[in-house]
Image: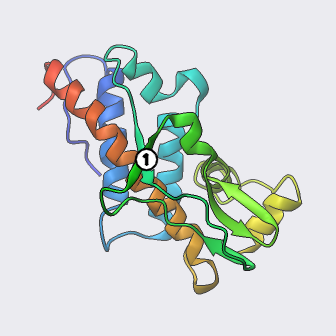
Amino acid sequence: MKGKFRFIGQPTLNYIFLNTLDELRYRNRINHYSEYDLLRSSALIRQLFLDGGKSLTDLVNKSYGVKLKFRVIAAVNDEREGNFLYQNIYPINDKYIELKQQDFLKITIIKVNNYEYSILETIKHACHVLGGVHLGKATDKKEELFKDMGGIINLENISKFLAIQCICRIIIDTLTELEIEIKKQSNGFK
């Protein structure tokens, strides 16, 4: 995929951020994604958010001060019973709440048997166990159960696929405001 934004001289944080966000959009376009696209999306989310205070979003937003708000459906506690549940948190109407990043990452998005998996755990698992960044081993029983559910896209495991896609859509929506601010204030992006 060729980057949409050009730069003059050395690449800047803005350039890297905008192209990373653009790649996340590309890998999550409607009706055209694959298991690999979702694994790569988990790596992009890690780069954008999960590298501590050195994530692309943290570094870029120091210059802009945009208050990032993650919009999720108003009722995010799913009390249904079952061995395997996925909770859609993407708002499809005006009934949503806005969360800070740390609260967004704590939301339970998948339940398997007696285990709950937060957004943060789901992304880290896709990055570090399933191959989004590198293939690794599950480190405990909870991760092993998650891994044993199979790949991201199959009939037994459609929930992981839906969860990562849902997370990506919310993150893309959230970062659009920062993207607009960067483009408004930056020279050299065409």
Residue 181, relative to residue 150: is it above or below? above
Q: Nearer the viewer, residue 113 or 124?
A: 113
Asked if residue 10 is positioned above or below residue 46 in the image, the reply reads above
In the rendered image, residue 111, in percent from the top left (x then y), is placed at 70, 67
Location of residue 37 by image quarter = bottom left
Q: Residue furthest right?
A: 141
Image coordinates for residue 136, horizontal then vertical, percent: 75, 53
Quadrant in the picture for residue 84: bottom right
Say how the picture is coloured: rainbow
Q: Residue furthest bottom?
A: 155
- Location of the C terminus by quadrant is top left
In depth, the one of 79 and 91 nearer the eye is 79
> Would residue 22 be seen by someone viewing this image from the given angle?
yes
**Residue shown at 51% from the left, 60% from the top:** 164
Residue 92, given in percent of the width and then of the height, sits at 33, 63
In the figure, is residue 180 to the left or right of 107?
left
Front residue of this view, candidates 175 and 74: 74
Q: Residue at x 53, y 51 (%)?
A: 42
| Front residue (pair 67, 163) | 67
Q: Is residue 36 above or below residue 104?
A: below
In-image side of 180 versus 130 (left or right): left
Residue 186 seen anywhere in this rendered image of the structure: no
The secondary structure type at the circle numbered 1 is strand
* Image spot of residue 70 (x, y percent): 43, 42
Q: Residue at x 58, y 30 (%)?
A: 51
The kind of residue on which mark 1 rests is Ile
Q: Which residue is mark 1?
A: 97
Give the crowd class for mark 1: few <14, some 14-19, many >=20 residues within 10 Å: some
